Amino acid sequence: LTLEALGTTAIGWIGGLALAWLLFVVLKINFYEPKGLTLTLTDLTPVWFSLPIPLATAVVVAWSIRRTFARLDAVAIVEQGKLSLETGAVRPEGRRLSVNPLSAWTFYQRHRRQSLLLLVTLGAMILGVSFPAFLFAPVGDAMQSFAEPLRQVGIVRPRMNGSVDPGVAAQIRAHPTVAQVIPAVEMQLRLQVPPLGYPLSIYGVAESDLQTLVNLYGVQVKEGRLPRPRTNEIVLSEAAALNRNLRVGDKIGQPINPDDRGIPTEMVIVGILSRPSQGHAENDLWLGFASYEYLTSHALYKSHPIHLIVVPKEGQKAEMDAWLRKDAHSDLAEAITFQWMQTNYQKMSLVLLAVFGVVEIVIAIVAAVALAVLSYTFYAPRQEEFGILHAIGRSRSWLVLRTTRETASTIAVAWLASAALCGLGLVGMQLGLYAPRGLSLNLLSPVPWLFTLPIPLAVIAASTGLVSRMLSKLDPVAIIERR
């Protein structure tokens, strides 16, 4: 019996890999090759990625068969023509009476094992879809937070290495909405945004300009002090330090941490900046500062372009940002503003959601087929029940509606159970994984739960269609006459 199940599983596994390979061929011909990209069709990653499915099936089937035969009473089958347990005969569940025999819950009250199997299968599929969506949701939230430093300033950086074109820089300094232009050298500190990493910009600025930016952001030195000129010292915001578990006196960069490829030298943390005390104080400030004199004099930072931090005049931030994006943004320089960055992050989030959407559609199709077949297996032995109800005056549409209510109610229970389990898991992740890194999960976001809707809808539609087809061929007279 195990070999029979494994043979069927192997055929399905090979067929699924073949369909995936054909899909890759279509993607390669229509999307990758026209854009000059490559897609290796001989890569075995999909094989290893999908291999746990047939292996898990083999284990579950073998365990189920062993459990069935351990409870099998062959003598009872021969003598009575029915299955019984060694502990004694069990009264058939179908004979249990119900207060409301026409209720959609009657079948599940009579067949609790089958109901439990449906609930567990549906709940596992819904949980498997919603949990990864919640897992990647903090990436989008973090990207939105990383744009906070641009709420007070704008950034202009050259398209090539070196400095911003002198003509463009002079035009920016002379604009009536600009109060000050601060030259800065950018480094990138790699933050931990589970399950990914994300680079945080750290700017090397002159000593006088550093105090100007600290006052502009409304922060103070919470621990330590500000970096001294011409030293490899650095100050980080409280959120950035918490994310990397850094304290005053710790060191970052290479070779201390190989992941800090954007910081080619050893840098010492000498100060931690507090959270903003005014304005958008509810948002963490993700930034850091170093010595401009040190970075511009060090050989390893010669290739780092010099950016311009553009400080607006009071009350003219929106006008300055609009002008930067319209006139300063060109083939020579790139202007980065708060609104543009927010829009860019939203587009990236939409792309990520689109990827999840495609995966969800595939899962929904597979789930609909599998669970519809499972539902049909449960409904097929109930032809006698349906025939009797139809013979006493219940229409086929009423029977279809009743089975649809049964499926919908089962899915609702499974969805609530998976939501509870997912909620507990997310709270644990927030307390144990994200909060220690200065991040937070948006537990009230409806977006991840929207990805779970295609599964129940597809299952309801497929189950209803199969049951409708079965009932269309139902002969109640033959069932009553026991033909």
Image (tube, grey):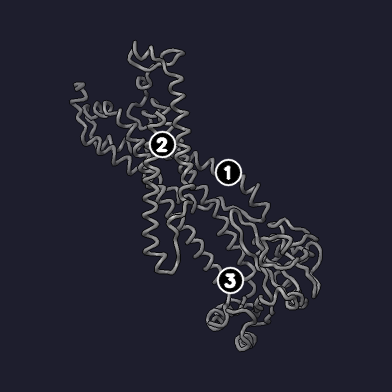
Q: Earlier in the sequence, mark 1 or mark 3?
A: 3
Residue furthest to the front in view is: 42
Q: Is mark 1 in CB contact (under 8 Å) with mark 2?
A: no
Residue denoted by label 2: 410
Of callouts 3 and 2, the N-terminal one = 3
As drawn, is 167 to the left or to the right of 364? right
User: At which x and y percent is residue 462?
Assistant: 32, 43
Image height check: is 7 above or below 230?
Answer: above
- Per the image, label 2 sits on a secondary structure element best described as helix
Q: Amino acid at mark 3?
A: Phe
- Percent x, y for residue 283? 64, 62
Q: Mark 2: give few (<14), some (14-19) or many (20+) Cα within 10 Å.
A: many
State the residue position of label 1. 425
User: Which element is circle 3 on?
Assistant: helix
Q: Which residue is mark 3?
A: 338
Which residue: 24% across, 31% down?
394
Q: Quadrant of residue 384?
A: top left
Q: Nearer the viewer, mark 1 or mark 2?
A: 1
- Contact (CB < 8 A) between labels 3 and 2? no
